[in-house]
Image: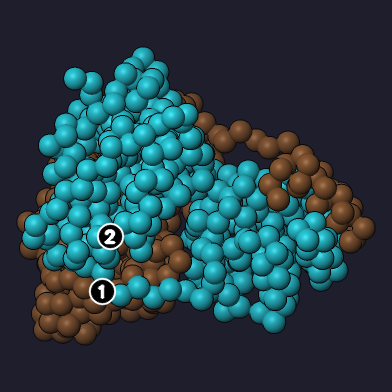
Amino acid sequence: MAEKILAVLEQREGNLKRVSFEAASVAVSLASQLGFEAEAVVVGSEINNLNELSKYGISKLTHLKNELLENYSPSAYSEMIALFANESGAKILIFPNTAMGVDLAPRVSVKLNAGIAMDCMKLEVKDNDIIATRPVYAGKSLIDVKLKSGVKIFTIRPNVFRPQPVDSATVQVEIKQVENPNLKTKVTAFKKSEGKIDVAEADIIVSGGRGMKGPENFHLIEELAEVLGAAVGASRAVVDAGWRPHREQVGQTGKTVSPSLYIACGISGAIQHLAGMSSSKYIVAINKDKDAPIFNVADYGIAGDVFEILPALTEEIKKLKS
Amino acid sequence: MKIAVCVSQVPDTATRIKIGSDHKSIDPTGVTLIINPYDEFAIEEALKTKEKVGGDSLVYVISVGDDSVKETLRKALAMGADEAILLKSSGNKDSLAIAKALSDEIKSLGCELVFCGKQSVDFDSGITGQLVAEMLGYNCVSVVVDFKLDGNKIIAEREIEGGREVVETELPAVVTAQKGLNEPRYASLKGIMAAKKKTIAEKPAFDSEVFTEILDMHLPPSKQPGRILGTDKSAVPELVRLLREEAKVI
Ligand SMILES: Cc1cc2nc3c(=O)[nH]c(=O)nc-3n(C[C@H](O)[C@H](O)[C@H](O)COP(=O)(O)OP(=O)(O)OC[C@H]3O[C@@H](n4cnc5c(N)ncnc54)[C@H](O)[C@@H]3O)c2cc1C
């Protein structure tokens, strides 16, 4: 029987997240290169879109189910996943590098005595082994690593590996009822932040810095974000000044993001800010100082006043979308 | 109550990284080392908890590393930690091996509450606290921005995508600190003087198997310098055209 590679999917509020399809695609691609079989597992209560997984070439999906597991429980989820991985004999596990994945993967790694590489941006098969490339020092450098353990765990950075639909794929879904989950640690409530989209998950981010001059001007950022369906981000200077909440902070001590488009408005591009966003696919900078370091990483820039450019940009995109 | 704080020492965040000659680590010349920024939140929360719990509570700071780490431990002592322990290791360790060394020491000290930073800003894995918890069989709440201890019970809020999860659990536990949890105090002059007199206990770090092999360290591919399309709003249509037709991102 072929060895197994297991994608550990993530659901929130009963829906598989996009990053779950990314993890599934990574598992399928590695499996085909290694001659392994790709399976998936998800923990939760009711899950609405399990069948969406059928597009991505996973042969079998196991849903470990219990009504008490609607919300995340680190103790229960980690035990159930480790037990399942053990029973199914999985040799490689792929988790999303999300808040949940980062919480779960290390616990599972201890239970399975598995080596672990977090936040991978590339997973390459060489000589029948996996070489993972991951950022260190806030993305200022990259390392290639190999895990020497029998079981190996990798977490993948969201938005970096694109989900790859496979022709005529189907998935066999098995639902396994789990008794008495370990609820020693459990989530009792979720406080949703008012912001619409979280920077960590956004495909487009419009970010404002001290050049926005004050919190009252951030409506210009919000309006552009709105027409683009983007998340609002901020530099630390702005967060420290209390203009924006910390959860919007991008950078070394904020969030690391890899959207397809990052628009930096009135942000100088300090090294700690670049650390969090320089792996964005495309970067646009609007800054009136043409020597600002942000232009060194930007693909396109306008060396002008944000108060003039932002409204014009919002208008232009509105025109395009209508 | 005995409280442990795991701290690490990292290059200053303003450091420009140069790859070392071994191509597996950074060139240390000219790099200033500081206490990991998230660990300051961990120390602060430990001190606040000690003050609240009172009695004969003690805060231990523990680090794995070489002699240079004493500097960072001294800083933690100056903030108000009671005891510092350096688990000496100069060899290669991965997160699992570091967590093993820390958890062995925490076990022998008998600490029932452990604080870590949510992430060390050098290797950025963000997993030490969770690993330590799992190795000790303790409960764990990671990336915490709000922490309350009521007797044995913990109610904490952790940051996740799109909001905060309210998590309930019990001691013994490990908590990893995120920015926003508190405002770390500055060391007082009295604290600094007292820290100078304290000894830092030194022990060899538990030597466990290392699973991670670093094959190569390299800089991210450098970007072509971008195009400045103009200096006023007349450049906007061209920007939108490029985003649509060339970059294909809108
Ligand atoms: C330990 C540590 C961790 C840090 N972590 C982070 C982090 O996570 N994220 C982060 O962002 N920073 C971080 N920093 C801070 C970082 O060093 C910078 O201070 C910060 O990024 C600066 O923010 P800014 O670019 O918004 O402000 P500034 O540096 O003040 O830049 C403002 C920019 O706006 C431009 N501007 C002004 N007016 C206009 C206008 N009308 N139109 C157009 N442009 C205008 C100016 O030319 C300037 O370039 C960290 C620092 C330390 C020490």
Query: Is A32 in front, or is A108?
Result: A32
Q: Disc 2 residue type?
A: Glu
Tell me if A120 is positioned left or right of A3 in this view: right
Which colour represents chain B?
brown
Q: Residue at x 63, y 61 (%)?
A: A229
Is label 1 on the same chain as label 2?
yes
Q: Is residue B29 visible?
A: no
Left or right, B233 with respect to A183, comes to right
Residue B246: image x %, image y %? Answer: 77, 39
Considering every residue shown, the one lying at the far right of the view is B234
Look at chain A in the picture and name its colour: cyan
Left or right: A28 with respect to B153?
A: right
Q: Nearer the viewer, residue B137 or A101?
A: A101
Q: Are marks 1 and 2 in contact (CB under 8 Å)?
A: no
Q: Dot 2 falls on which chain? A: A
Single out the residue that lies furthest toward the top: A127
Task: Identify the residue at horizontal 54%, vertical 72% (top origin).
Answer: A195
The 10 Å Cα crowd at callout 2, few under 14, some 14 to 19, many 20 or more, is some
Q: Is residue B134 above or below residue B150?
A: above
Judged from the image, the secondary structure of the residue bearing numbered disc 2 is: loop
Provide the residue designation for mark 1: A188
- Quarter of the N terminus of chain B within the rendering: bottom left
Classed neighbour count for the residue bearing mark 1: other residues with Cα under 10 Å, few (<14), some (14–19), many (≥20): few
At x 30% / y 44%, what residue is drawn? A8
**Which chain letter matches label 1?**
A
Mark found first going from the N terminus, 1 or 2: 2
Nearer to the camera, A301 or B129: A301
Question: Where does label 2 land, which residue?
Answer: A46
Check disc 1 and give the amino acid type. Answer: Thr
Is A190 left or right of A210, judged from the image as shown?
left
